[in-house]
Image (cartoon, helix red, strand yellow):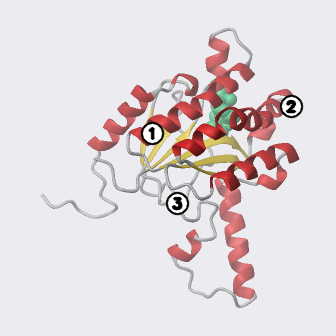
Amino acid sequence: MLNDDFHVAIIMDGNGRWAKAKGLARTAGHLKGSDNVRNIAIAASELGVTHLTLYAFSTENWKRAKDEVNYIMKLPGVFFEKYMDEFIERGYRMNIIGKLDELPKKTYDVLIDAMEKSKDNTGLVLTICMNYGSQMELINAAEAYARDVKEGKAELPLTNEVFESYLMTKGLPMVDLLIRTSGEQRISNYLLYQIAYAELVFCEEAWPEFDKEVLKRCLDEYNKRDRRFGGVKNV
Ligand code: IPE
Ligand code: IPE
Ligand code: MG
């Protein structure tokens, strides 16, 4: 059984390798991967996930070839053009986090528009991390808090609750389950604070081939785990 508020975060990895294995360009993997965001949002919602947070582009991904980066930057436009109406119909609330002001203006506008159009929805909270990096997020939060203390708007000592309100994930519950696709077992600067007590599940499937069955398998694995949060289970 999942909690009432169940937060799944996914590192959507393996688009490039998936495409290469099929003799396609890496960009073909990104296109297929972005379409899969729609399928997995629906699957997750049907399986009882209330919050789904997806890693789409990291603050380190700018290191990639210009053509690949440019292609990824155009995907939100293509994606929301195809699926926004359906998301609204399904009651999903779009939440985009990351350093959005560094994105191309067109991409920025599309993302803001998606949030604006869905802000009153009460269904699945679908958070897309775009130009997101956890270290950047934590440093920005520390800076903003220090500034507020200096200006008399915040006080010491700092509590978890107050610190969390300075994070980009403000308002989201802590992550229950973190999934990484395509066989890599690392965190790659994702939600370092928010995964403090998350269960980690790694699967071999690349993101474009991650489907409802694989998601179900990950949730089954989660259900077998014994979460103790530092305590001792009564036996
Ligand atoms: C994930 O797939 C998408 C992004 C990081 C933007 P990758 O592009 O990292 O695919 P691999 O890991 O190279 O196969
Ligand atoms: C993590 O994947 C970032 C996203 C999925 C957006 P990467 O492919 O960038 O991670 P590394 O470089 O293999 O650690
Ligand atoms: Mg990768």
Can you see residue 97?
no
Q: Residue 172 carries which label?
A: 3
In the image, residue 20 above or below residue 185:
above
The kind of residue on which mark 2 rests is Lys
Q: Quadrant of ligand 1?
A: top right
- In space, the residues marked 2 and 3 are separated at their CA atoms by 33 Å
Tag 3's secondary structure?
Answer: loop
Position in image of residue 62 (x %, y %): 80, 40
In this view, the residue in front, 26 or 97, is 97
Disc 2: CA contacts within 10 A as few (<14), some (14-19) or many (>=20)? few
Q: Which amino acid does label 3 sit on?
A: Leu
- Residue position for label 2: 66
Secondary structure beneath dot 1 equals helix
Q: Which mark is in front, 2 or 1?
A: 1
Please state which of residues 122 and 70 is positioned toward the viewer in this rendering.
122
The picture quadrant where one finds residue 184 is top right
Classify mark 1: residues with Cα within 10 Å, few (<14), some (14-19) or many (20+).
Answer: many
Image: 235 above or below 216: below
Location of residue 162 by image quarter = bottom right
Q: Mark 3 or mark 1, which has the lower sequence index?
A: 1
Rendered view: 141 above or below 45: below
Which residue bears the numbered disc 1?
44
Q: What residue type is labelled 1?
A: Ala
Q: Please provide percent x and percent y for residue 209.
A: 53, 22
Q: In the image, 132: left or right of 92?
A: right
* Residue at x-position 67% and y-position 57%: 135
152 w.r.t. 230: above or below: below
Residue in the picture at 71% in, 82% down: 148
In this image, 132 relative to 122: left or right?
right
**Residue ID at (29%, 43%):** 223
